[in-house]
Amino acid sequence: MFNDSSARIAAALRERIDQAPPGTRLPSTRELVAEFTASPVTVQKALRALAAQGLLESRPGVGTFTRAVRTARPSDYRWQTAALGAPPARVPRLPTALKTAPNDVIALHSGYPDRELLPERLVRAAFTRAARGDMAMSRPPAAGLPELQHWFAAELGDAAPAGTAPPAPSDVIVVPGSQTGLSSLFRVLVGPGRPLLVESPTFWGAIVAAAREHVDLVPIPVGPDGPDPEVLADAFDRTGARAFYAQPNFANPTGVRWTTGLADRVLDVVRAHGAFLIEDDWAHEFGITAEARPVAARDDGGHVVYVRSLTKSVSTAVRVAAVIARGPARDRILADAQAESMYVSGLLQAVAADVVTQPAWRTHLKGLRHQLAARRDLMVASLAEHAPQAHLEAIPQGGLNLWARLPDDTDLPALARACEDAGVLVVPGDEWFPAEPTGAYLRLNYSGPNPGAFPDAARIIGRALGAD
């Protein structure tokens, strides 16, 4: 956010730039700090604003220069209207959660954890080893590296209760991220024009994937404990749907975690209707006061198709996830995944397998639990003190987000703009509903950078709510 001082400096430099020929070197930051009696941060904000307007260019190691103004005739792209025709589907716009945040704002919007929460040392060492191995130059098996398949299968099998057959490594299909996996599952298990039951609210990526695959979403309301099995059964009967997409552990955005009893009841409903449960275990490593309990571990009849990604917990540069399915469904999913991406980079798979099989991986996860707890509790306390209008129905036992209910008359777009103008990025909750929102919500990520700024962010949110 640009304050009055940075705006004043930008205006003064703009006049100087207008009078200077292209390529003129500006004084150094130190000289501008002395000239305008301002802090280096304020001067840098002014320079970034002018660079964003195309008036300046930075040459590393040399300095900042006025930019030559290039003029060209406007391009005419009208011919593309006829060539493209009507769009095949109304795919929702990408959500606020993917917005790139400037360095000078408090980012509560992202869906990814801050770099300091990732096992950076393990990842860097794994990349070094992988680059020296065969996978740097080889094509991996279509379903994934055997060692990674084995790890995913063992992780799920360890949670299986007595009497339930654990998955085999051959049941695992490695895919390039869970978003790709969801698109494939929606194509194979549902199909265009067919209904898919989904929790409401739910992960925006599932909403986008369904729109791309022309799948019709049927919302299932979620309470503080999860979906109502009777409502779910009625929806199966009414729509003829054959799949239900859900996040039983630390759901994004609500943070809801199903009890074992609810998981069994939902599984009974799915089995009774000869249907699939598409389980998205996105936050498996992000438990705080509770562990993730995959529903897939309780099913050996092929009704639960399980998705688990390592992108958020290992590194955003390692786009690796797994789909675990059994029977003919597994074969169809593999064929679809091959047609979509052929195979997943063997180098990235080798890195992922290296990281999660190191003894230090478990040590990292123990520390991560404490770090997430401290961040979550700080944000909860900050909201309670400075933005009590943002009501939390429950404190999540894991995950990365808080789901805050706002007064019913809140103008969410205006609130988000007011917060951004004051230097805080938030995500309006309506982006997470597959149909009309049932209230005004904010999703606030407590795993982002600079947790020390959470109290300031809460003050800004509280002031914006008070001004509504």
Image (cartoon, rainbow, N blue to C red):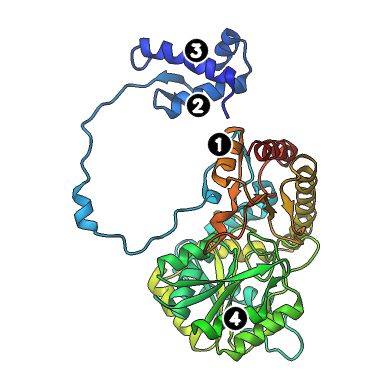
Mark 2 and mark 1 in contact? Answer it, CB < 8 Å: yes
Mark 2 and mark 4: Cα distance apart in space: 51 Å
Residue 335: percent from left, percent from top: 42, 79
Q: CA distance from mark 3 to mark 1?
A: 24 Å
Occupied quadrant, residue 145:
bottom right
Locate residue 56, reporting x and y percent: 42, 23
- As measured in the structure, the alpha-carbon distance from the residue carrying label 3 to the one carrying label 2 is 15 Å
Q: Disc 3 marks which amino acid?
A: Pro
Please name which of the two marks, 2 or 4, marks the residue nearer to the observer. Answer: 2
- Residue 140 vertical placement versus 125 (above, below): below
N-terminal of the two: label 4 or label 1?
Answer: 1
Q: Is residue 217 left or right of residue 33?
A: left
Of labels 3 and 1, earlier in sequence is 3
Disc 4 to disc 3, C-alpha distance = 62 Å
Nearer to us: label 3 or label 1: 1
The quarter of the rendered structure image containing the C terminus is top right
Residue 457: image location, x then y, percent: 69, 38
Residue marked by disc 3: 27
Image quadrant where one finds the N terminus? top right
Can you identify the residue that label 1 sits on? 102
Count of numbered marks: 4
Q: Which of marks 4 and 2 precedes in the sequence? A: 2
First of labels 2, 1 by sequence position = 2
- The residue nearer to you, when weighing 281 against 117, is 281
Q: Mark 3 near mark 2, Cβ–Cβ under 8 Å?
A: no
- The residue tagged with tag 1: helix, strand or loop? loop
Q: Is residue 311 left or right of residue 213?
A: right
